Image: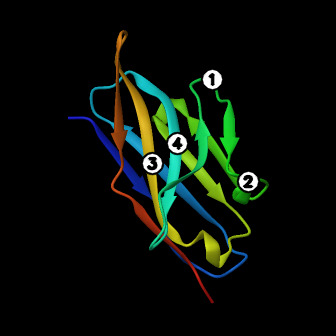
């Protein structure tokens, strides 16, 4: 059974840091591409950062220079390092991954979400 599990959320003060993890497990060959999304109460889900299979990255303007997405292929894990956090970053963060299941088959998965709260 293929699973995508997020971890690392929590409560942090403004200016603080958190690192989110998105780990894929089960019968997969690799993680092809990943996007980190977030959804705040009353708002639509938005793309925060993405990384491709060859490590090209993209970021929302609101997090550029503060967030970094990177991957550890050996662990089938993608991380989101979040620095200089602001109250506006408060949201549930979701990992969305395109997984390579076989040499010719991919499938898209969502994680269960992890809460990030930035507050003093």
**Kind of element beneath mark 2:** helix
Q: How many marks?
A: 4
- Is 105 situated above or below 24? above
Q: Answer left or right for 29 relative to 14.
A: left
Residue of label 4: 35
| Quarter of the view holding residue 101 | top left
Is 75 positioned to the left or the right of 47 in the image? left
Residue where numbered disc 3 is placed: 95
Q: Which residue is mark 2?
A: 61
Q: Mark 2 or mark 3: which is in front?
A: 2
Residue that protrudes farthest toward the right in the picture = 65
Marks 2 and 4, the one that precedes in the sequence = 4
- For the C terminus, the quadrant is bottom right
Which residue is under mark 1? 54
Residue depth check, mark 1 versus mark 2: number of the one nearer the observer? 2
| Element type at mark 4 | strand
- Can you tell which of label 1 and label 4 is closer to the viewer? 4
Closer to the eye: label 2 or 4:
2
**What's the residue at 60%, 85% (across, down)?**
119
- In percent of width and height, residue 56 lies at 68, 30
């Amino acid at each position: 059974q293929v699973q995508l599990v997020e971890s690392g959320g929590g409560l942090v003060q403004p200016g603080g840091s958190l690192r989110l993890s998105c780990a894929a497990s089960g019968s997969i060959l690799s993680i092809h591409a990943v996007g980190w999304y977030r959804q705040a109460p009353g708002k639509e889900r938005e793309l925060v950062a993405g990384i491709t299979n060859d490590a090209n990255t993209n970021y929302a303007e609101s997090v550029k220079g503060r967030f970094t997405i990177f991957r550890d292929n050996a662990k089938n894990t993608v991380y989101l390092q979040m620095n200089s956090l602001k109250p506006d970053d408060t949201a549930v963060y979701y990992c969305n991954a395109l997984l390579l299941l076989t040499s010719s088959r991919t499938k898209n998965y969502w994680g269960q979400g992890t809460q990030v709260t930035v507050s003093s």
